[in-house]
């Protein structure tokens, strides 16, 4: 059995299925670049047939990313597989991931198909996918609740048809670790051609067991784990990449395999995904939470100072915390700026984009004494999203006075035309959003508004996330500024711009 554990990242597909986590094509490209830098083996870039936007995103990621295999999801339907194949044409290395449900409840109630029909459709799908690429993954959806004999039958047929990876999804997060591991072991032992495919685990976190189930699968012979950054994903999420990777790396005494992941890219990836989706990472989240390496108790601090391994099982810098932290200021040059951002996983696709970000950095350095990695990431993230926006903030003036309503005067450029509006309500943010809304012919609902400080101190950048809903569609907007009202306006405008680019989307499991 191989000692390489393949990391299949599905942040851009299953992760994006979290309500409210939709990403634009440009955001997906930015995340894919960080995943490539992290040396993720397979990036599931989307579900090509879901919408024009998804197709374009898979295609763009396939054309840009060179070192990771790019994958598209496809139901076991001819039209899905052909759409996935089309989107992946430009990839250096491509994979089609096709699936059909195999549990009794899904076959009867959702598909209205007999087990025989499901086997036939699985075989047909894998055979068709093999016409597009030699790398075909098959998933029996809801395997965690499927009959084991039937799983053996459908998987054997899929491997005979050419599937090279067999992914076992615990679609509803129902399994217990010992049971999921046992299933993997039994399938590998019982299926006569199992040696012709790599077995994979795809676990959901409904009972908080996604990582435990994935690791149990690895202990029982799985050599691919499907996971997402920050554990993002449908409902309670998927297995978290950082937890799986660090568990395997830290406990090499237990696991007979390891990943190829550059773990120093974990924190930049976590921050980027959190900022793009507006899904804040809880402080006590393993590996990437703000407190993951913070020792508060005196006895722990004392122990760590005397000998680090008394209380630390991993080194913070190995997952990207404070790695080579270079504090920058107003005298730092363009090259130092570029080098530091490259180290943080950010590449500039043109001189213009570097220059725009550098200008913003200088503006920030005028307001803020020391600039930390987190500031740089927030700043560049903003510069890169703003480029293609058709609604832009030109100026904002807000007044606050005790006992008085807040007044906001906002000036926007909408498709190149300058427009001004004012609003007076109770609340500076509310007045700002009202003034902006009055300039646009839409009635969006604000579902979430959150502010966080990017670094410490009262001069810190404030990062605002908003979640907006319009006509059943949900988007996230982000903005950062040392002034949190301006950051709020930027986030709101960023969200509104996304309504102009996103398109209708189908859900793979419907
Ligand atoms: O959870 C699931 O079953 C899936 C499949 C499409 C693999 O995401
Ligand atoms: Zn899933």
Image (cartoon, rainbow, N blue to C red):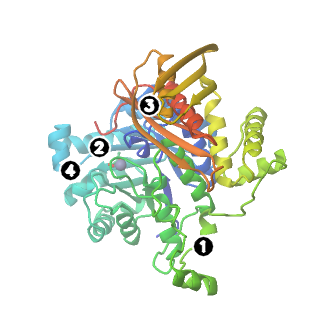
Of residues 23 and 302, the one drawn nearer to the viewer in this rendering? 302
Q: Position of residue 247 (x, y in %)?
A: 48, 70
Asked if residue 87 lies left or right of residue 119, the reply is right
Dot 1 or dot 3, earlier in sequence: 1
Q: Position of residue 7 (x, y in %)?
A: 50, 58
Q: Which mark is residue 315?
A: 1
How far apart are labels 4 and 1 at the CA level? 42 Å
What residue do we see at 32% from left, 48% from top? 235
Of residues 77 and 456, the one drawn nearer to the viewer in this rendering? 456
Dot 3 or dot 2, earlier in sequence: 2
Question: Circle 4 sits on which residue?
Answer: 103
Label 1, secondary structure: give it: loop
Above/below status of 277 relative to 200 = above
Dot 2 or dot 1, earlier in sequence: 2
What residue do we see at 62% from left, 54% from top? 455
How far apart are labels 2 and 1 at the CA level? 42 Å
């Amino acid at each position: 059995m191989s000692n390489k554990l393949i990391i299949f990242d599905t942040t851009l597909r299953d992760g994006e299925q979290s309500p409210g986590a939709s990403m634009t094509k440009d955001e997906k490209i930015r995340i894919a670049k960080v995943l490539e830098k992290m040396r993720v083996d397979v990036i599931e870039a989307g579900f090509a047939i879901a919408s024009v936007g998804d197709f374009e995103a898979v295609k763009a990621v396939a054309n840009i990313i060179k070192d990771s295999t790019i994958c598209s999801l496809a139901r076991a339907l001819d039209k899905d597989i052909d759409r996935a194949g089309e989107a992946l044409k430009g990839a250096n290395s491509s994979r089609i991931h096709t699936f059909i449900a195999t549990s009794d409840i899904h076959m009867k109630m959702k598909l209205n198909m007999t087990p025989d029909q499901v086997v036939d459709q699985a075989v047909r799908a894998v055979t068709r996918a093999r016409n597009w690429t030699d790398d075909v993954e098959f998933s029996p959806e809801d395997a965690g609740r499927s009959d084991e004999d039937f799983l053996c039958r459908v998987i054997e047929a899929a491997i005979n048809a050419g599937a090279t990876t067999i992914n076992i999804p615990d679609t509803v997060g129902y399994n217990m670790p010992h049971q999921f591991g046992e299933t993997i072991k039994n399938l590998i032992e019982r299926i006569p051609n199992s040696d012709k495919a790599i077995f994979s685990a795809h676990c959901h976190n409904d009972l908080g067991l996604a990582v435990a189930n994935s690791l149990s699968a690895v202990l029982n012979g799985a050599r691919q784990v499907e996971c997402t950054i920050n554990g993002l994903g449908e409902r309670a999420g998927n297995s978290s990449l950082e937890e799986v990777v660090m568990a395997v790396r830290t406990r090499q005494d237990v696991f007979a395999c390891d990943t190829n992941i550059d773990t120093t890219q974990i924190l930049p990836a976590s921050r980027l995904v959190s900022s793009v989706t507006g899904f804040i990472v809880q402080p006590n989240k393993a590996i990437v939470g703000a407190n993951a390496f913070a020792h508060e108790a005196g006895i722990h601090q004392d122990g760590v100072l005397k000998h680090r391994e008394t209380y630390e099982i991993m080194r913070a810098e190995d997952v990207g915390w404070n790695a080579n932290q270079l504090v920058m200021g107003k005298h730092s040059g363009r090259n130092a700026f570029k080098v530091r951002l490259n180290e943080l996983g950010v590449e500039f696709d043109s001189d213009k984009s570097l220059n725009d970000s550098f200008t913003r950095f200088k503006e920030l350095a005028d307001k803020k004494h020391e600039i930390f990695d987190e500031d740089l990431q927030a700043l560049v993230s903003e510069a890169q999203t703003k480029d293609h926006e058709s609604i832009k903030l030109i100026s904002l003036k807000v007044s606050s006075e005790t006992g008085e309503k807040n007044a906001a005067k906002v000036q926007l450029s909408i498709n190149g035309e300058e427009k001004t509006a004012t609003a007076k309500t109770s609340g500076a943010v509310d007045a700002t959003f009202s003034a902006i809304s009055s300039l646009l012919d839409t009635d969006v609902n604000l579902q979430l508004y959150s502010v966080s400080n990017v670094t410490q101190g009262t001069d810190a950048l404030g990062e605002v996330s908003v979640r907006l809903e319009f006509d059943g569609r949900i988007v996230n907007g982000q903005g950062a500024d040392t002034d949190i009202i301006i950051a709020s306006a930027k986030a709101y405008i960023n969200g509104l711009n996304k309504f102009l680019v996103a398109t209708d989307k189908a859900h793979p499991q419907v």
